[in-house]
Each structure stands twice: as structure tokens, then as C-alpha cells.
Amino acid sequence: MTGFALTAPNRTIFGRGCRVTAADEIARIGTRVLLVRGRSVAWVDELAAELTHSGCCLQVVYSAGEPDLDDVRNAVAFARGHRAECIVSVGGGATLDLGKAVAGLCVSEGDVAEYLELGNSSPRQLKDPLPFIAIPTTAGTGAEATRNAVIGVPEKQLKISLRDPRLLPNLAIVDPALTDGSPKALTLASGLDAITQLIESYLCNRANPVTDALCEANIRPAMASLHRLMENENIKARDEMARASYLSGLALSNSGLGIVHGLASVIGGRGAAHGAICGRLLASGLSVNFGAVTRGLGNVERFHKVNEWLADGLGNSGEDGVLALRSFVDANGLPSLKDLGVLNAEIEEIAELALSASSTKANPVKIQFEEICYLLRSA
Ligand SMILES: [Fe+2]
């Protein structure tokens, strides 16, 4: 039997309406709170008022999109100035990543860049992070269940992870109601990220019996729920997507990903949104990997299952799930790679960089440069 180690947030509270417990839970962890938030979720104002009412001393940092080195440096300086005892993030994956990085770096000396895998020297080890509480408001990255924070390094046009098992949140509070009414484009891109994470975790060369169980139970329902949400708002589908997102984070943290996320780390470094890139590349990534496994390089059975779950979830039982996914993505207006800023002339450079991306190393088969170029062209 395959051996495995399992990591997860210390504690998770999941359920519609569970956000009402947040202020009490946070106040028990620390009273000097740095709240990292996006601007769009009105409930954060309520949470801030409740925290103040509970006796917490609060400072707020606004996150503005996927964080880069300077965003992290500024927020860490702010947290240190506030003498924060815990960091709370409320928002999408980028906001969660910023808070997670601040929790990790607040008590560690030196600059954030020294802790990233940049260049040849090995990164410094973090001191024990501050307690971190993650409250997601989108269903996509599963960052509330992962041990890494993705940080943009503009001068290298790359996104690099700050990675440490101690970066897993002390507490994840996942209330699907916080995602109700999210715009269609955001729901689509973030939902496709969660689905890509479940699929890549399931197919990757580090899958284990626990991650298999998480992925097998959730790929089909997640695809069906996202399909439903593209037609109309639906509470049950929102609940299922929030669960799929959380579990996709748990799965990828304990197994790995693949070429789609390898490419997303390169293309995302040039400024494109992560979820949309994953959604745009998933069908082509599956086709290229399927081609390689059918040449006798891997486990064909798993690809057949994924194909079937996608077809079922999209209401096309018995047909080709990958083709159905391609049509679904196009019909719902996901941006093209060109819209995401990928030029034909850059394909070979992107493919070369993706070959050495950390996610690519878990791809189910060793993928070749020409196959990655083909993947990008066919996407
Ligand atoms: Fe992702």
C-alpha cells in the first residue's frame, strides 16, 4: 500500500452561516489582530465591528489582487508595527495568500525574498509563524487548506510560493454564503481552478489513498455545480463549490498538481488571473497527458474516470468529457489565452519555463517541451 503523510488546517469550521462564530473564535486566538481583506465583501465590516466589540485591537490591510514582494513587505511592516498576535484574512485566494505570507514572515528576520526559492541558494527557514485564520469569500483556490502562499516576483515575471507546513491556517472558517451572488466570470474562473486542482491531484504521480478519496468524491459534483451556477444562482451549488474548493486545497497540499498549474505559475507571473488560466488550459492539458498515457506511460484508467465524471457533471453522460469541458468553457465566455496576454511568439519561452516549475514535477507523465508547446497552441 502507498504510504503517505497528511497535513490539514489545525481546525476547520465549514457550513452555511458558520461565519457568525468568527469573532469569538478569533478573539480566543489573539486580541491584537491584523485583518487582511479585499474591498468587495460587506460582511467584513460587520466582522471588524464585532471584533472591536469583543475587545480586540484591530488594524486593517487592504489586499489589491495577487500579492507581489512589495505588497508582502509593506503588510509585514504594518503587522510588526501593530504588534499583531494573529493574522485574519477574509477574501479570495490572493487575500488569503497575503495574510498567510504575513503570518509566516512577521516574526522572521530579513526580507521576504530570502525565504523564496529564487536562484540557486536554498531559502531561509521561517521561525514559527503567527496564528493565521483564513475565511474565504470565493470558491476556487482552496488556499484556506494549503501550506503555501503564492507571491509575484515582478522583476523575474514569476510567481513563487512561500512554502512551509507551518503556514497551514490554525483555523479555516468556510461559510459558502460568503460566495452567494458572486459575479458569473469570477464564479467560473475560480470554480475551474478548484476543479483543475481536484483533477491534477487525482492524476498526479504523488496521489495517495486519502487524496484519491477526496478527489473521486468531488470532481463530478463540482463540475455539475459549476454548470448549474452558470445557468442560475443556486444555494446548494454554492455549498458544493465551497466544499470542493476547500477539499481541492487539502488534496493538492497532500499530493501535487501537474502541467496545467506548472504553466499557470509561469503565465500568472506575467499578470494573468490564475483561475482563468487553469480553466483555459485544463481540457488541452488532459488531452496531451491522455495521449502520453495511452502510449503506455501511465495509468489510463484514471483518465477514463475523469473523462466520465466531466461528461456526467456537464449533462453529457456517455460522451467525451474533455470535449464537453472545452465547449462549456467557451460557451460561458472564459477569456482566451490571447485575452489573458499570451502571445504566439512567447509559447516556446513559456513552455521552457514551465518544464522546471514545481507543479510540473508531479505531472502523471514526464512531459516533453514539444508537448507543452502543442498544449498551449491547442488551448
Ligand atoms: Fe490553482
Image: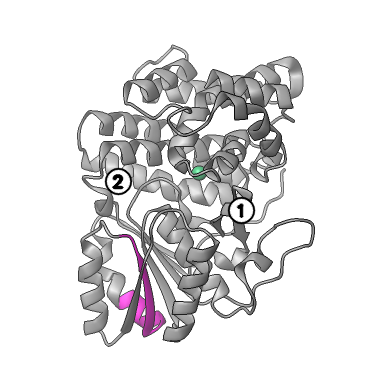
Q: How far across and down, in percent of the image, does residue 351 sit?
A: 66, 31
Identity of the residue drawn at 27% across and 34% down: 229
Q: Does the magenta segment cover residue 277?
A: no
Judging by the rendered image, the residue that carries numbered circle 2 is 239
Q: Quadrant of the N terminus?
A: top right
- Give me the residue at 43% from left, 26% from top: 336
Where does residue 262 sit, x and y in percent of width and height?
Answer: 62, 39
Taking the image as shown, residue 37 lies to the left or right of residue 96, namely left
Residue 284 sits in quarter: top right
* In-front residue for pair 313/94: 94
Against 190, residue 97 (above or below) is below
User: Circle 1 sits in a helix, a strand or a loop, which is it?
Assistant: helix
Residue 4 horizontal side relative to residue 67, left or right: right
- Mark 2 falls on what kind of element? helix
Q: Name the residue at 27% across, 88% down.
A: 55
- In space, the residues marked 1 and 2 are separated at their CA atoms by 39 Å
Residue placed most toward the observer, 56 or 338: 338
Q: Position of residue 175 (x, y in %)?
A: 30, 56
The kind of residue on which mark 2 rests is Asp
Do we see residue 319 in this rendering?
yes
Q: Residue at x 55, y 57 (%)?
A: 151
Residue 203 can be seen in this image: no
Q: Which residues are magenta?
A: 24-38
N-term mark: 1 or 2:
1
Residue assigned mark 1: 155
Marks 2 and 1: in contact by CB < 8 Å?
Answer: no
